Every structure is written in structure tokens, then in C-alpha cells.
Image (spheres, helix red, strand yellow):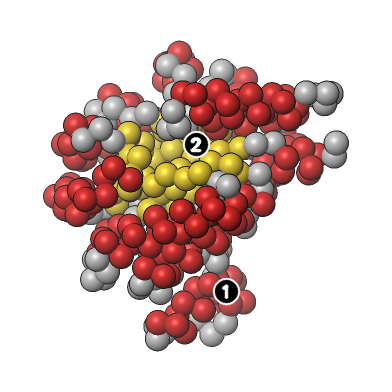
Amino acid sequence: MDLDAFIVGLPKAELHIHIEGSLEPEMMFALARRNGVALPFASVEALRAAYSFTRLQDFLDLYYQGAEVLRTDEDFRDLALAYAARAAADGVVHAEVFFDPQTHTARGIPFSVVAEGLLAGLAAARERHGLTARLILCFLRHLSEEDAFAALRAAEPWLDRIAGVGLDSSEVGHPPEKFVRVFAAAGERGLRRVAHAGEEGPPDYVRQALDLLHIDRVDHGNRALEDPALVDRLAREAMTLTVCPLSNLRLCVVDAIADHPIGRMLKLGLRATVNSDDPAYFGGYVADNYRAVAPLLSREDLVTLARNSFLGSFLPAAEITRHVAAVEAFTEGERL
Ligand code: ADE
Ligand code: ZN
């Protein structure tokens, strides 16, 4: 089987995707028109040309601006369904999807519009594409913990349909310790916990996320590699890292894809996975991310990444077993 068919055919879960980061320029313009929102770009091409970043904040500024076209439950439904269709075409059979409610409630869009729209889109995706999905509510770390608590309170009626909470946005200067109480409150409500850590922030932020926020997964985690004791701990605890190669390239977390540490992570025994982060902004969905790092890896490594994506998911144990068996069945008869 050729490499591309192998990558697409491998059953995969996606564990690090911001739904607002899947807003393609074409849809951004269509929603701007539908909702009467003025965009500060003359065309789709001009917008795409602006997607040139030297660090996380450059991207975040455009990402929050782009999200302003999302107004109605139909917009959120369309966004979720478009992502799911694209992911399913890449062989994604399960997705755990981040959303940033504070980005929307701060503009006067009710939490109910965001949640109901996204849930409707994901339900339609299951019908049409057979892809299962869960939502993860991310707190914006550049805002206060009080603001995060307000988001958690607003989410209360939907918590049975939300798998967990996460922490995203500007990392440096906003350490995990800022959110200890709200993560504890989320844990008390039975929610799973994840956090972006070690994307631009130091290894100590990864430690804080583990020790103070009690996270189940590390989102990114690249800079943990600077700390051998931390690497040993992450490997020993079989902590899942949701790694995003094209994001790392476009946000200058790595200088070149050839320098990407994904192979090193696997060799160190880390439970790394490959994900798209913000595919509309970083030039690729999940299969593009696998393709980008494939020259650095063996086929066995690609299978490990796919297997890890299910092992690190929040699916019930029986579902994980079923998906891992499907990964093994797919690779049977292939010379790895
Ligand atoms: N929000 C969307 N994508 C993000 C990323 N890669 N890091 C932090 N916050 C984000
Ligand atoms: Zn992210």
C-alpha cells in the first residue's frame, strides 16, 4: 500500500483540534456575508496571505478576529459539520473537539447558541460520516480565573454533553497555577482535564499542569523535552501528548519540519499523538500532519501514533479496545 493510502486508511482519533481554528477562509467570508459582518480583508486570498506567523500571539490575534463571524447556532453547526466531514475523509473516526466559549460570550453570543450549534453539528456528523465526537470546553488563559468560573457556570446545563475542560490561548505569563481552583471545580463535576503546556511555555508549566491542574493529557508538551526528569515521568505515567506538527512549524515552535521532535518523543517512550490544532490556519488536517512527519518515522511509528490516539482518548475502555483492534486489523498483512 502506498504511504498516502496507509496514512488515510489508518483509523485515527483526533485529540487536539480547536473548532474555531477549522474556520476556513471561504467559510469565514460566507458567514461574514450571511451575518452582515465586515471583514478587514478584501478577499480569501488576502486573508490567506495574512497567515504568516512568527509566534503564537500573531496567530491568536487573527484567530479571535476570524471567530467574530460566528453568530448563530446554524453557524456553529455548519462549522462543526464541515470539520467532521474533512476529518472523516482523513480517516478520523473519533474527535475530541475544543471550543472557546469566552471568545463568543464576550461578544454577546449566548453560551446556549455555541453549545447547541456545535452539538447539532457533531450529531449530524455522526449520522453522515459515522464519526463520534465529544466537546472539550477551553478556558482562555489570558483572562482571569473568575472569568473561567463564569464560563463553567454558563456550561452547567450542558455538562453531561461535555467531556472535559482545557486551557488555551497565550501561554507565556499565564501559568497553569492561575487556574487551580476552576480546574478543581471541573474535576468535582466529573469532567476530564487537559491543558496546553510546553508549546511556548517552559517545562515548569507542564509540571504545574500535572501537579496543580491534575490533567489527563498534555496539549503540545514540546518543551518538556528540555527536562529529562520530566520526560521520564511523562513516559512512566503514560501521559498522552497531543502533538501538532504543522502548527509547531507555522508558529515557529520548530525551525523546520525535519527538526520536529515527534520521532524523538516516540523513542523516549512518550505516548505522543499527531493532531491538526487549527487546520484552517496551519495548512492541514490530520492526514496532512501525518504526511508532514512521515519522512521522519517508520510505518510502525505511524501505527503507534494511531494506536496512541485511541489510548489517549476519553472513550470508554471497550470502545478503545475496539478501535485499537481496528488499527491492528488495518495493518495486518502490511509489511511495516
Ligand atoms: N488556541 C487555538 N490554538 C491554540 C494553540 N495552538 N495554542 C494556544 N491556544 C490556542
Ligand atoms: Zn491548540
Q: Quadrant of the N terminus?
A: top right
Q: Is mark 2 within 8 Å of ligand 2?
A: yes
Find disc 2 in the rendering and name its residue: 242
Q: Disc 1 to disc 2, how far (Cα)?
A: 28 Å
Relative placement, left or right, of 6 versus 85 is: right
| Mark 1 crowdedness (10 Å alpha carbons): few <14, some 14-19, many ≥20 | some
| Mark 2 crowdedness (10 Å alpha carbons): few <14, some 14-19, many ≥20 | many
The residue positioned 43% from the left and 38% from the top of the image is 219
Q: Quadrant of the C terminus?
A: top right
The residue positioned 36% from the left and 68% from the top of the image is 73
Relative placement, left or right, of 99 versus 46 is: left
Q: Position of residue 179 (x, y in %)?
A: 21, 40
The secondary structure type at the circle numbered 1 is: helix
Q: Position of residue 132 (x, y in %)?
A: 51, 44
The quadrant where residue 101 appears: bottom left
Position of residue 123 relative to residue 324, above or below, is below
Q: Residue furthest front?
A: 127
Question: Observer-nearest residue: 255 or 14?
Answer: 14
Find disc 1 in the rendering and name its residue: 26
